[in-house]
């Protein structure tokens, strides 16, 4: 049997739409083994009542993609999932499912795929590389598509950087959150974001996060997504006032993520209270960045 632990991830980090991701210290566990016949799927935790336990299950589909790719035939498969990453909250739950399924399947079928092939396959299935690359590599990852494959660079997270997540109690599916993205962007806004991405990467790389607030500003996707998350602008403003060093929508939302190298309790409370004033119940989590990506254990 193989056990794979996969981190939650936050994508975009403000200006880096579809190319920046960061792994968080919150994990799903995927266990997989070959059995004599059939498909058995057990699910505990997040999504347990609703997630499919048949061939439409995302972990199974991802595993099957790897098995097909390497030509591995199996008589039957047992999958056990411990889901700790909330679903449809912008925390990379689908990437974790895909990456977990693919890594487990790769080990079962004799480790025929390299890490970069897993990232390519997973990214193709997910539709964008930011969450999957961070889920595989851990830390902070820049991921772009070039020559038909994903090119990544991983950066160690600044030592004391932590995040406060405010996770609204309603789901927001990435498909819906992408429908509001503009088809064209004015050159001024492109220049605005380009500068911020460069500033952000140099801040994270050097560990000097004094300009993180400016570096995390975005004019490309977040302004269009504010209507999908009631109170979003006010939560951003309140978190800044309470001392957050940087703030962004986590992936395509609805969670909002604040960053700091000092205490985040106040920021976390203020974010939750501001959501409540806007009619949204939100759960708070304070997490470390995960320097490690997905990890596999033979058991
Ligand atoms: N980069 C994607 C988006 C991430 O913002 O739509 C989704 O988690």
Image (cartoon, grey):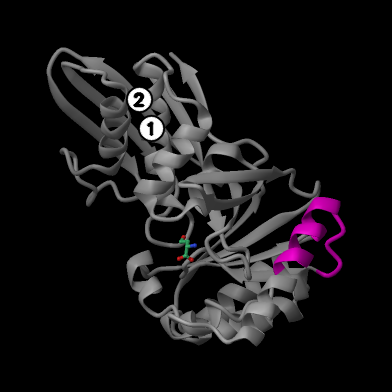
Q: Is residue 208 magenta?
A: yes
The span from disc 1 to disc 2 (Cα, nearest Å) is: 5 Å
Left or right of 254? Residue 165 is right
Horizontal and vertical percent for residue 8? 51, 48
Say whether residue 281 is visible. yes
Q: Which secondary structure dominates the residues rendered in magenta?
A: helix
- Which residue is tagged 1? 102
Q: Tell me the SS state at disc 2.
A: helix
Horizontal and vertical percent for residue 3? 43, 24
Q: Using the image, tell me which numbered label, if any, was put on residue 74.
A: none
Horizontal and vertical percent for residue 24? 59, 48
- 32, 281: nearer the viewer: 32
Q: Is residue 2 magenta?
A: no
Q: Is 199 above or below relative to 126?
A: below
Q: Is 116 above or below relative to 20?
A: above
Which residue: 86% across, 67% down?
210
Mark 2 closeness class: few <14, some 14–19, many ≥20 residues within 10 Å: many
Mark 1 closeness class: few <14, some 14–19, many ≥20 residues within 10 Å: many
Query: Which residue sits furthest left?
Result: 38
Q: Is mark 1 within 8 Å of ligand 1?
A: no
Q: Tell me the SS state at disc 1.
A: helix
- Which residue is tagged 2? 105
- 258, 49: nearer the viewer: 258
Residues at badges 1 and 2 in contact (C-beta under 8 Å)?
yes
Question: What is the magenta range?
Answer: 197-211
Say whether residue 83 is visible. no
Which residue: 44% across, 78% down?
181
Q: Is 51 above or below relative to 172?
A: above
């Amino acid at each position: 049997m193989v056990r794979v632990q996969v981190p939650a991830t936050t994508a975009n980090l403000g200006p880096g739409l579809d190319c920046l991701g960061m792994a968080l210290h919150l994990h799903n566990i995927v266990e997989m083994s070959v059995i004599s016949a059939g498909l058995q799927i057990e699910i505990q935790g997040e999504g347990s009542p609703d997630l499919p336990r048949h061939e439409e299950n995302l972990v199974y589909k991802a595993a099957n993609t790897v098995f097909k790719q390497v030509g591995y035939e199996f008589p039957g498969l047992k999958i056990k999932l411990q889901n700790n990453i909330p679903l449809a909250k912008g925390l990379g739950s689908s990437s974790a499912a895909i990456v977990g399924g693919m890594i487990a399947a790769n080990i079962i079928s004799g480790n025929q795929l390299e890490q970069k092939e897993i990232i390519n396959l997973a990214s193709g299935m997910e539709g964008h590389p930011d969450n999957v690359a961070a889920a595989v590599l851990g830390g902070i990852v820049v991921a772009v598509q070039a020559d038909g494959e994903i090119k990544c660079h991983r950066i160690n997270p600044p030592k004391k950087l932590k995040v406060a997540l405010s996770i609204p109690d309603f789901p927001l599916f990435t498909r819906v959150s992408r429908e509001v993205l503009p088809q064209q962007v004015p050159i001024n806004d492109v220049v605005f974001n380009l500068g911020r991405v460069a500033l952000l990467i140099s801040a994270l790389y050097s560990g000097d996060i004094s300009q993180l607030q400016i570096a995390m500003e975005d004019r490309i996707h977040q302004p269009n997504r504010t209507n999908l998350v009631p109170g979003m602008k006010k939560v951003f403003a309140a978190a800044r006032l309470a001392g957050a060093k940087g703030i962004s929508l986590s992936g395509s939302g609805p969670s909002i993520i604040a960053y700091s190298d000092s205490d985040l309790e106040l920021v976390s409370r203020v974010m939750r209270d501001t959501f409540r004033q806007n009619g949204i119940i939100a759960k708070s989590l304070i997490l470390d960045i995960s320097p490690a990506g997905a990890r596999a254990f033979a058991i």
